[in-house]
Amino acid sequence: MVSEKGIAAREEELKRSVERLEALMEEIPTGVVNVDTKGKITYVNKDILQRTGYLQEELVGKNGFRLGLFPRETLKVLGKRMKEKLIGKPPSPLEIQFKRKDGTWMWVEMRGKALWEHGVPVGIQIVAQDITERKQAEEELRREKETFQVLVGEFPIGVSAISKVGHYEYVNPKFIEMFGYSLEDIPTGREWFAKAYPNQEYRNQVISTWVTDQKGSKRGESRPRIFTVTCKDGSERVIKFTPVTTGAEKQLVTYEDITEHKRMEEELVAHHQELIEKTGEVEKANQLKSEFLANMSHELRTPLNAVIGFSELMLDGVPGEINDEQRQCLNDILSSGQHVLNLVNDVLDLSKVEAGKMELKPENLSLADVIDGVVQTVRPLLDDNRHKLGVSVEEGLPLVRADKNRLRQIFLNLLSNAINFTPAGGQLGIEVSREGDWCQVSVIDNGIGIRKEDQERIFEPFCQLDNPLTKEKTGTGLGLTLVNQIIEKHGGRIWVESEYGKGSRFTFTLPLATTA
């Protein structure tokens, strides 16, 4: 038998152990609460008081179920867990809200175990861990996930979210519509690859490309790839994959269906190839046409020159005297012959350009000298129509690099048009200035002008405009076409500015000799 002295020693040792345990519980950074079998709080440690703001006397001795410390809807769950602990069921954590003294709520994870005395349960000791920050983080993550799903749910392209271990955590409605596979059909990347790429060889190629890309990708970087995917219904779609590395935890992938785009691209390539072949045929036919026109023009010039020459001889009276009626007929023959010859010459020049046989003989020229010579040539026409011609050449203008004869042809054509389409007594002008490395020349008139719809076609072959001054179409319709071709062959360009009824300005550029 144990003596009374031994019992007293044991009780004293037990008391000291309890005191040491309570001192330890006061210092640990975790809440500890003891309650009896009726729910009355018998002990709380310092951590609980600090975290909740209560005083010890506000909790100890009070029934925890009646203090309003827990949401009403959780009281039954809490009571059930207490009974389970008292009858010895294994402890399991319970996440529950706890009301602080200031009225705010905190989240705690509670674990309880029964307290025994003399073999009888006398209460429960609860260890409460503050998990408020964790719950807030989980709530924030939940809201972000909901927001993400709402946003990508409306995307016109497919989107999936994949965990770092290869599990598909989310696919948006467009993904399901595009491929026919839901999240249940493809829980992991293995299932997805097996279904999307049933051909083993092609699947291995896709996986190899995918893995290589992932190893070389940095956070936030995307590397689009194009693969052919087999959908759930067996159809094949060409898909542009764009994986975005968001960190170690998750990866987002977008899926854009470019099947129709690829089909159109292939058709476009085929059409382009066909166009190249047809263009070659057209160019060859155009070359043959130009050569034919050039040869024909040469053949026509010889008899035309004979017709014109004999007409002039007869008009001069060399073969003998002619009467007035014969003179009128000869004048008509001469005029028509010269018109046809001009047309043949224009056709010949145009054919040479198109056939690439027009050879320029560029030299350094004074544009002022060329213009003086041209003005002397057209002076009779200017005088007949009482036209005034003003010439303005910028002082110090450098020489231009051009073929002199072709340059005269340009001026004569533009001035002839200006004279023909300007009423008697009108004002014509030539303005020359330097624009950077180019010389810019404008031939101006205050004649009848050109309608806007005609301005786009006047440089096309055989385009002839009605001339209300003569009540007929004038010229061959090739003059401006030749002018355009000759200027382009010099490296320049020509354009027109005109207002119908107020006149026209034809402007072209030529290279300066210093930069040619």
Image: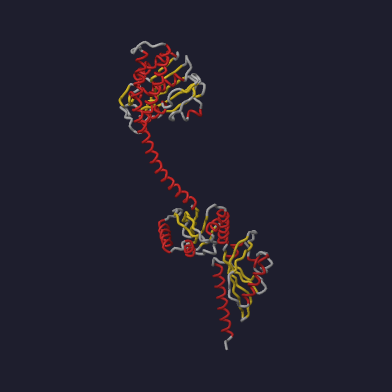
Whole-percent x, y for residue 342 in the image: 39, 23
Q: Is residue 347 above or below residue 50?
A: above
Of residues 28 and 363, which is closer to you in this image? Answer: 363
Residue sticking out furthest to the bottom: 1
Q: Quadrant of the C terminus?
A: top left
Of residues 8 and 221, which is closer to you in this image? Answer: 221
Is residue 165 at all visible to an observer of this figure?
no
Whole-percent x, y for residue 348 in the image: 36, 28
Query: Residue at horizontal 51%, vertical 23%?
Result: 500
Image label count: 0
Q: Is residue 509 left or right of residue 105?
A: left
Q: Quadrant of the N terminus?
A: bottom right
Which image quadrant for residue 393?
top left
Q: Is residue 292 left or right of residue 14?
A: left
Residue sticking out furthest to the right: 66
Which image quadrant for residue 23?
bottom right
Is residue 19 at all visible to an observer of this figure?
yes
Of residues 158 and 61, which is closer to you in this image? Answer: 158
Whole-percent x, y for residue 62 in the image: 67, 68
Q: Is residue 82 above or below residue 134?
A: below
Q: Identify the colour scheme used.
A: secondary structure
Whole-percent x, y for residue 250 in the image: 49, 59
